[in-house]
Amino acid sequence: MTGNSYSARLDAQIEQYRQVENIHDLPDIFHYWSNKHLRPRLNAVTGADSIADFYALPFAQAARAAGSGRRLLSIGAGDCSLEVAVAKRLIELGTRDFRLDCLEISPHLLERARSSIEKEGLGYCVQLLRTDLNEWRPDARYAGVMANHSLHHLVELERVFSAVADALEDGGSFVSNDMIGRNGHMRWPEVLEFVEGIWSFMPDRYKFNRQLGRLDARFVNWDCSNDGFEGIRAQDILPLLTGRFGFTMFLGFGGIVDVFVDRAFGHNFDPNSPSDTAFIDFLQLLNDRLIDGGVIKPTTMFAVMCKERDIEPTCWRHWSPEFSVRPVG
């Protein structure tokens, strides 16, 4: 990628979140789906009952093992709303002597983060560092590193993963919830066939694209990486991670159902409508059966990783990290 192309994409990425007040905002139907179908799996695989828990539990364990120091890191922290929740949860768990460094490139998001951290009185343990992760080099060692939906914005994945491995203490945890589907969050051909088939019998009221403000009478396999860094190398994330880290826990999910519960079309579905929720439940069942048979692969992961490679992870069903990698070719 040329310097001019990279700079233009970086500017677009920063501008994307300038006016977005809640970068984690999702449709009500997403919360119906995640609470019914995803939350029990997260609890079963990781012991966590929330996203903050998912990061705080392995961080607390790694911090105890690290003893003094207890440095933690978030790469691509955004507005730090989650990092603030993780810090508060760590304190609740009895982990108090820690420092969470938060790396972020957007000055707009950093300003919001600074305000939130000050409001919660966490300035003593949550630190902000403006950094372009594609050029980041660690200057400290960390008991835990988190990446919450930031990896799919990165071009230099190999460099970043090497930096994380170098920065991670022995016995430390690299924890991530991120996208692992096709680049640009497009559907792979085997998934697109099912989505297009479902689209053909859906009423038009479910086909309005709230993000783009248009009716998609036919499903558009949109490439979100056209302008900025959204999903720029999403399909490379899991193969690179399996080649670099061991996994202690892994939960893969998504493929078909995420199209219908995410920001573009999820607002068209009403969690108080029995027919709408039955449709989402059907999509989840279909999604599960297709992953079970290896027909499609997950598009999102919860993963707790470590530097030790010879380790057997706790997974949902037989959906291991290796099983969840889609061969590209």
Image (cartoon, helix red, strand yellow):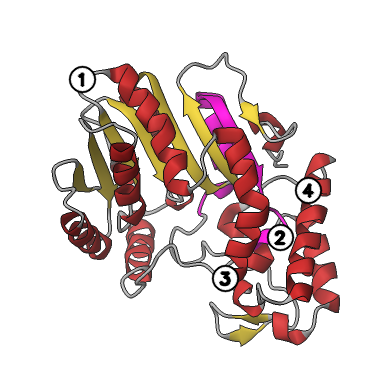
**Residue at (38% x, 69% y) in the render:** 16
**Is 75 above or below relative to 81?**
above
Q: CA distance from mark 4 to mark 2?
A: 10 Å
Label 2 crowd bin: few (<14), some (14–19), many (20+), radius 10 Å: many
- Relative placement, left or right, of 143 versus 46 is left
| Residue 76 in view, yes or no | no
SS at mark 2?
helix
Judging by the rendered image, the residue that carries numbered circle 1 is 68
Kindly identify which numbered label has been placed on residue 257: 2
Q: Is 251 in the magenta?
A: yes
Mark 4 crowdedness (10 Å alpha carbons): few <14, some 14-19, many ≥20: many
Q: Nearer the viewer, mark 1 or mark 2?
A: 1
Disc 1 crowd rating (10 Å Cα; few below 14, some 14-19, many 20+) is: few
Q: Which residues are magenta?
A: 232-258
Q: Label 3 sits on what residue type?
A: Asp
Instruction: Give the mark, 1 or 2, whose residue is nearer the N terminus.
Output: 1
Q: Which mark is residue 288?
A: 4
